[in-house]
Amino acid sequence: MAIPEPLLDGYRNFKDSQLAHQAALYRRLAQGQTPQTMMIACADSRVDPATIFSAGPGELFVVRNVANLVPPYEESGGYHGTSAAIEFAVENLKVKNIVIMGHGQCGGIAASLSERPVGQFIAPWVDMISEARDVVLAENPGAGAATLQTALEHAAIGSSLNNLLTFPFVKSAVADGRVQLHGAWFAIARGELHWQSHSGQFEKIS
Ligand SMILES: [Zn+2]
């Protein structure tokens, strides 16, 4: 199959502009990567961490999945893609920060709040936050859809931060002060970044 036109145009643009200016950087990065931060973000096309944080190549180790969820530590076999990336980031790359970045209008979060089945793979994936969803529903009786959506987007970040600590290598890295965990949330329409404070509240970065 031929390369789709928008991808071809994009690559040519990259090659002629960015790569032309960063050829030495790319050659150096070919020797290895030392990103300081792991970012766990949503697969949503509107919330690219490299764009939001103005990060160049080699600066962020990024995993993106539906609704930026971290599954709990499991010893059973299976294709634990996100868990493998967390292990690599902490054990091999020795990242200093892990950021879970949620966002507004998240389809994965909406799927969790939806009453209809939402797909063969999506439904069991977002079932990971069913407990957080039930808490949000119980704490916000009569709330509108938008309020519930934002509340669960925030609560799911908390749930993923808790799940991170179920990985023994993350738990010990955090206890030793080698790794710091962070929660963040991005408002698409306003381009606002909100960072989770120690109290658990999300505060807008000015
Ligand atoms: Zn999303």
Image (cartoon, helix red, strand yellow):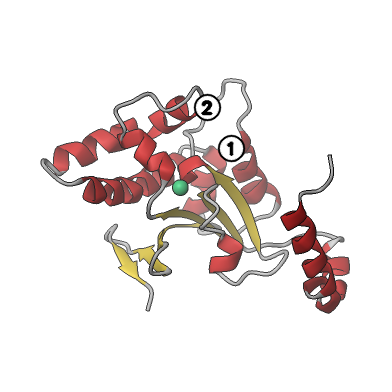
Q: Which residue is mark 1?
A: 83
Above or below — where is 18 with respect to 88? below
Label 2 packing within 10 angstroms: few (<14), some (14-19), many (20+): few
**Mark 2 or mark 1: whose residue is earlier in sequence:** 2
- Number of marks in the rendered image: 2
Q: Position of residue 40 (x, y in %)?
A: 53, 50
Q: Tag 2, which secondary structure? A: loop
Mark 2 vs mark 1, CA separation in Å: 9 Å
SS at badge 1: helix
Q: Residue at x 36, y 44 (%)?
A: 156
Residue 165's x, y, as percent?
A: 45, 43
Q: Is residue 196 above or below residue 156?
A: below
Q: Which mark is residue 74?
A: 2
Residue closer to the observer: 112 or 98: 112
In the image, farthest residue toward the left: 142
The front one of 177 and 110 is 110
Instruction: Tell me what residue is drawn at x 51 percent, y 55 percent.
Output: 176
Indicate the position of residue 179 as horizontal and vertical percent values. 53, 57
Q: Is mark 1 within 8 Å of ligand 1?
A: no
Q: Is residue 65 above or below residue 41?
A: above
User: Would you say residue 144 is visible in this rendering?
Assistant: yes
Viewer-proximal residue, 30 or 48? 48
Q: Tell me which corner region of the image, top left, top right, bottom left or bottom right, holds residue 54.
A: bottom right
